Image (tube, rainbow, N blue to C red):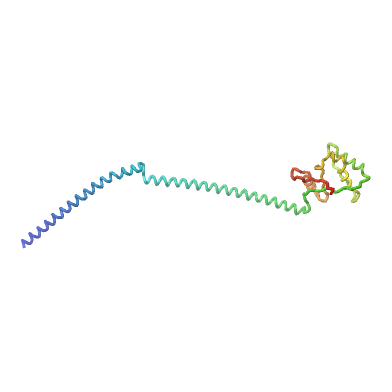
Amino acid sequence: MPEDEDSSEGLVVKATKGIEQDIKRLLSTLETLKQDLAVENLWVPSLQEELNPSADPFSTALERLTFQLAKSLRDFAVALELRARLERLVNKFEDLQKDIQRVIDAADDIEEYYPSFSLDKRHMRLGLAVFHGRDDLVKCIAQMFQQEETPCVCILGPCGMGKTSTLLAVLDSSLLQQRFPPGSRVWVPCIEATSANHLVQIALYSIGNAWRSANYVRRDYF
């Protein structure tokens, strides 16, 4: 038994020494690796500084995020301003459309109230080919229109007595033609000038060459 115990203890001691040797070799290897890593760690900061001396990944990312956010906010503000301007333009167009519609409605009302009223060119009626007996009256009326202050002449009488023919003779007189050129003589049928406003409008459209070219009253003999 003692021999067996001695042999067992010897084996344990031998195994223990072997383990100790292995541990030492492992520690030596680890120390070598530690030294190698230390050398490599010395190169990493230098490489980073060489590639980008002021590079800070967190700061760089934060700056980029701030820049993009500021740009997005500016774009959003511009979009809001454009939208506000477009809304104001739409409101102005709507108001203008309402005003135009009111003008159209008013014109429709006038046309409905005066359906026969027209501002086209008027033509004088033809005078009588033979006109006798009123030469003195025609000359008197024509002389009245030669004054500085042009008078208003009204010829009254029953139907058929020659009021229109007398007026046409006055318009054809040489005195009146010298005083008023053809573009200043206006023929307004009384059945169409149903109001003072219509009379003024017809007169303006008849002599107003500034509004419409060739829109004047002329006498047609053909």
Could you say where residue 83 lies in the image, as x and y percent from the top left? 55, 49
Which residue is pictured at 83% across the width and 48% down the height?
220
Name the one closer to the observer, 60 or 194: 60
Horizontal side of 93 relative to 204 (left or right) equals left
Name the one closer to the observer, 4 or 125: 125
Could you say where residue 181 lies in the image, as x and y percent from the top left? 82, 40
- Residue lying at the far bottom in this picture: please name it: 1
Name the one closer to the observer, 208 or 87: 208
Q: Quadrant where the N terminus lies? A: bottom left
Could you say where residue 170 lies in the image, as x and y percent from the top left? 87, 43
Which residue is pictured at 5% across the width and 61% down the height?
3
Which residue is pictured at 33% across the width and 42% down the height?
50
Total marks shown come to 0
Horizontal side of 160 relative to 121 (left or right) equals right
* Residue 211, quarter of picture: top right
- Residue lying at the far right in this picture: please name it: 133
- Residue lying at the far front in this picture: please name it: 222
Could you say where residue 48 lies in the image, as x and y percent from the top left? 33, 44
Name the one closer to the observer, 37 or 59: 37
- Residue lying at the far left in this picture: please name it: 2
Q: Decide: is 15 above or below 40.
A: below
